[in-house]
Amino acid sequence: MNKPIVVIDGMGGGIGAQLISRLRELLDERQDIIALGANFGATERMLKAGATRGATGENAIRVSVRLGGLIAGPIGIIIPNSMMGEITPVMAESILAAPGERILLPVKNEHFTLPGLDAAPLAKIIDLAATAVKERLDGGNA
């Protein structure tokens, strides 16, 4: 079995929950998916969506992000003070320093603009991210 997939989200955890739900449709049910939430609500929502296990907060993210062969979440997880301040500098640095490959969803954020990207519905972005995770796992890169 592959290394765990780590899904990180904050605020309400809606993007992470949708991504986990889609991953569960695409992947073997034995695939370990770790939900890491910037807050309890995000973690709880991702667990309900099908994550194998979960943890919450800065230290949990700092320690557990290293477990993932693939790390997925909205692009704000690598930007300090994004998600209305929920992503601390320590969290962002830990996510960027982790050994796993990051698959980042280019969702709108008030702190930055990503010119050149086609505007796509969130459901399409989540589907593309889940498909990228599956392709990496099928290719043996995670």
Image (spheres, grey):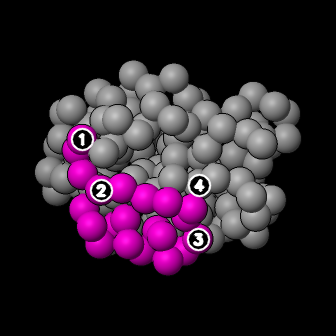
The answer to whether residue 103 is above or below residue 24 is: above
Image x and y of residue 82, in percent: 22, 47
Q: Nearer the viewer, residue 79 or 87?
A: 87
User: Which structural element holds mark 4?
Assistant: strand
Q: Quadrant of the N terminus?
A: top right
Disc 1: which residue: 59
Q: Quadrant of the C terminus?
A: top right
- Crowding near the residue tagged with mark 3, few <14, some 14–19, many ≥20 C-alpha atoms within 10 Å: many
Label located before the other in sequence (1 or 3): 3
Residue 33 bears which disc, if any?
4
User: Which structural element holds mark 2?
Assistant: strand
The answer to whether residue 99 is above or below residue 24 is: above
Image x and y of residue 30, in percent: 74, 58
Disc 2: which residue: 56
Disc 3: which residue: 50
* Disc 4/disc 2 C-alpha distance (Å): 14 Å
Q: Is residue 28 left or right of residue 111?
A: right
* Disc 1/disc 2 C-alpha distance (Å): 8 Å
Image x and y of residue 94, in percent: 33, 29
User: Which structural element holds mark 3?
Assistant: loop
